[in-house]
């Protein structure tokens, strides 16, 4: 278990990123939510607790990963766009990633 | 085992690779089933993007008469080098692009893919949707003889299975053909918005004379904060597709939100006027494998072939993926037809699939650009340095300062060396050339 080299983006450049509420984007997406099966889960909460930078909170394009007041990672799988980034991008391979059951999940109207 | 569901061939995935394979096999008379997890083929699929007609010609020669779901022909295409306050455009617009059919068309995948799958249905393919393939059925020797699905009694048998499952290649990994997930340095995460805008407005803003013209532009530099990646702008019939993709590793190590990078790109003073008043009709995200030739999975085993994104068949430099997928799907289909004739589905025989791919542009191109992803990975500053430099240099060049031209040339050189040492420039150029020449 290790984390890759980190770079810090020039703070002046980072400051030019407009704060964006991902929910404003997600209202345009159509989903068929499977209430009975969460296709994405955290394998081990302890690993997240020790994860220094928690990149999943940022790189997930649907904001599926959030943290509660205690710092525990919550997974709002219902908003998932099934891109696969968290499976690959979590530095500790701590995301149990599966395909939703057939027919469930995102259904693009335009694509 | 009364009603064992048996076919001549199974295809997993209803994207360009899978549908092309299914069409090819059905036309040769094989009983073919295509299994797709989405509500319809295309429900899960998402790209920029541009489709290439050479691939359609190869798979479905009469595609034009079948009412294909395409947006606009690409008649104006190229690169924009975007700095924080300027753009330098390298685009070509040509009457030569205006033939019917055009070389390429913009498209929306939730429209195109279902149309393509319907052509397969019309040619006799059984397309089963809302069904996720979960694993494989094997004979006593461990050879694949079918697939399991998440449907009750959902086992399906066939002597040959073509896997066209896309970039998240869980099945390819399950068979051990791909050793592991791609590391985040070899995969790009793209986000895109599809914005609705009246046809006439699209045409006015992009200088198009009518629905038989369209633009496809890749934007480098500030679109992705100067980090390795690209932005893109494509005109659809009554809308604009705008997005950006970055190597996933860059998002991870910089804790960046992809949709904020896109919001920033849309807000850029050069870009914003094109989008004014357009309404967001959809947002989405998808990975692009930048696997590279040397890291591609094994393409076949007993009873199985792998095609398209599942095998990392993307030429990221030229934003080509669908055409590689279609041609690979077709070649896999042809190999399956041949295997049926010979009644031989062994890895030894299916090796022929790889051999034929090697003779096609698919593996030739992937081999030529084998170093391209490594290039981006090893020169993360490339975009920012050179895109900003090019804009600065152009600014000096196009404005009169009352400065002797020789002094201006010196200043331009200084601008570059301030950003990067001479040696650094030389090394970057050699790496870039190597990436392009193979
Ligand atoms: C933002 C973006 C822009 C792009 N721009 C371009 C472009 O301009 N031009 C271009 O040519 N290419 C472009 N590409 C690349 C192109 O989209 C892909 O290369 C192409 O779609 C690959 O086709 P495929 O059939 O291999 O996979 P996909 O199109 O991903 O299809 C895979 C299919 O398999 C299904 N599936 C997966 N697993 C299962 C399972 N277990 N059971 C059942 N079904 C399953 C999926 O639902 C999906 O329908 C772009 C990609 C992105 C993300
Ligand atoms: S899921 Fe991965 S990236 Fe996110 S907090 Fe847990 S360990 Fe860190
Ligand atoms: S698959 Fe993509 S959209 Fe879904 S949770 Fe993971 S990163 Fe987010």
Image: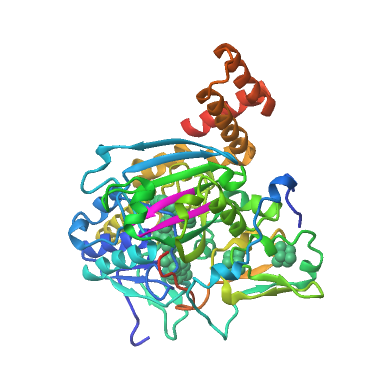
Whether residue A39 is visible here, answered yes or no, is no
Please tell me whether the stretch drawn in magenta is mainly helix, strand or loop.
strand
Displayed-image quarter of ligand 3: bottom right
Whether residue B341 is visible here, answered yes or no, is yes
Specify the quadrant that holds the N terminus of chain B: bottom left
Instruction: Return the residue nearer the eye: A102 or B337.
Output: A102
Residue B209 is one of the magenta-drawn residues: no
Residue B139, percent across and down?
A: 44, 71
Q: Residue furthest bottom?
A: B2
Residue B98, percent across and down?
A: 24, 43
Question: Going by the image, does A3 lie left or right of B183?
Answer: right
Q: In which quarter of the view is residue B131 placed? A: bottom left
Q: Residue sitting at 29 percent across and 37 percent down? A: B94
Number of numbered discs: 0
Vertical position of residue B90 compared to residue B56: above or below: above
Residue B227, percent across and down?
A: 62, 44
Q: Residue sitting at 54 percent across and 61 percent down? A: B173
Which stretch appears magenta?
B232-244
Vertical position of residue B185 compared to residue A24: above or below: above
Vertical position of residue B153 compared to residue B304: above or below: below
Question: Going by the image, does B188 lie left or right of B143?
Answer: right
Residue B421, percent across and down?
A: 68, 24
Q: Residue sitting at 50 percent across and 61 percent down? A: B172
Instruction: Return the residue nearer the eye: A95 or A60.
Output: A60
Q: In which quarter of the view is residue A109 placed? A: bottom left
Residue B235 is one of the magenta-drawn residues: yes
- How is the rendered protein coloured? rainbow
């Amino acid at each position: 278990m290790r984390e890759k080299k980190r770079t810090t983006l020039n703070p002046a450049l980072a400051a030019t990123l407009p704060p964006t509420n991902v929910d404003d984007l997600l209202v345009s997406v159509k989903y068929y939510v499977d209430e009975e099966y969460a296709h994405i889960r955290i394998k081990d909460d302890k690993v997240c607790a020790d994860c220094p930078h928690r990149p999943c909170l940022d790189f997930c394009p649907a904001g599926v990963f959030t943290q509660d007041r205690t710092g525990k990672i919550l997974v709002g799988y219902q908003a998932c766009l099934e891109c696969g980034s968290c499976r690959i991008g979590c530095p500790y391979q701590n995301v149990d990633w599966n395909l939703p059951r057939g027919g469930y999940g995102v259904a693009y109207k335009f694509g | 085992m009364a009603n064992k569901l048996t076919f001549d061939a199974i295809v997993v995935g209803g994207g360009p690779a899978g549908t092309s394979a299914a069409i090819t096999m059905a036309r040769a008379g094989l009983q073919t089933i295509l299994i797709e997890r989405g509500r319809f083929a295309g429900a899960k699929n998402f790209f920029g993007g541009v489709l290439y007609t050479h691939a359609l010609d190869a798979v479905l020669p009469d595609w034009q008469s079948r009412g294909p779901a395409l947006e606009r022909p690409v008649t104006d295409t190229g690169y924009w080098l975007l700095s924080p306050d300027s753009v330098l455009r390298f685009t070509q617009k040509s009457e030569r692009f205006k033939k019917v059919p055009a070389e390429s068309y913009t498209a929306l995948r939730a429209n195109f893919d279902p149309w393509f799958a319907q052509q397969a249905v019309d040619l006799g393919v059984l397309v089963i949707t809302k069904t996720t393939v979960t694993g494989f059925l094997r004979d006593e020797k461990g050879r694949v003889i079918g697939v399991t699905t998440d449907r009750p009694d959902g086992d399906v048998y066939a002597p040959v299975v073509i896997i066209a499952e896309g970039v998240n290649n869980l099945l390819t990994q399950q068979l051990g053909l791909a050793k592991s997930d791609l590391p985040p340095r070899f995969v790009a995460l793209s986000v895109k918005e599809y914005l609705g805008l009246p046809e006439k407005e699209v045409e006015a803003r992009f200088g198009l004379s009518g629905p038989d013209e369209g633009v496809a532009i890749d934007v480098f530099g500030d679109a992705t904060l100067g980090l390795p990646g690209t932005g893109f702008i494509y005109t659809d019939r009554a809308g604009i597709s705008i997005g950006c993709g970055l190597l996933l590793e860059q998002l991870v190590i910089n804790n960046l939100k992809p949709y904020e990078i896109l919001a920033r790109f849309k807000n850029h003073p050069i870009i914003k006027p094109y989008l004014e008043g357009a309404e967001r009709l959809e947002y989405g995200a998808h990975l692009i494998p930048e696997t590279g030739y040397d890291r591609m999975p094994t393409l076949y085993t007993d009873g199985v072939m792998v095609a398209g994104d599942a095998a990392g068949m993307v030429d990221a430099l030229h934003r080509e993926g669908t055409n590689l997928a279609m041609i690979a799907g077709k070649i896999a289909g042809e190999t399956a037809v041949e295997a049926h004739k010979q009644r031989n589905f062994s890895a030894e025989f299916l090796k022929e699939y790889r051999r034929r791919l090697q003779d096609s542009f698919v593996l030739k191109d992937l081999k030529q650009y084998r170093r391209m992803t490594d290039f981006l990975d090893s020169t993360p500053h490339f975009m920012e340095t050179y895109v900003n430099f090019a804009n600065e240099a152009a600014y000096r060049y196009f404005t009169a300062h009352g400065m002797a031209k020789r002094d201006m040339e010196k200043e331009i050189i200084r601008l570059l060396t301030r950003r990067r040492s001479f040696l650094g420039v030389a090394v970057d150029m050699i790496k870039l050339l190597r990436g392009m020449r193979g």
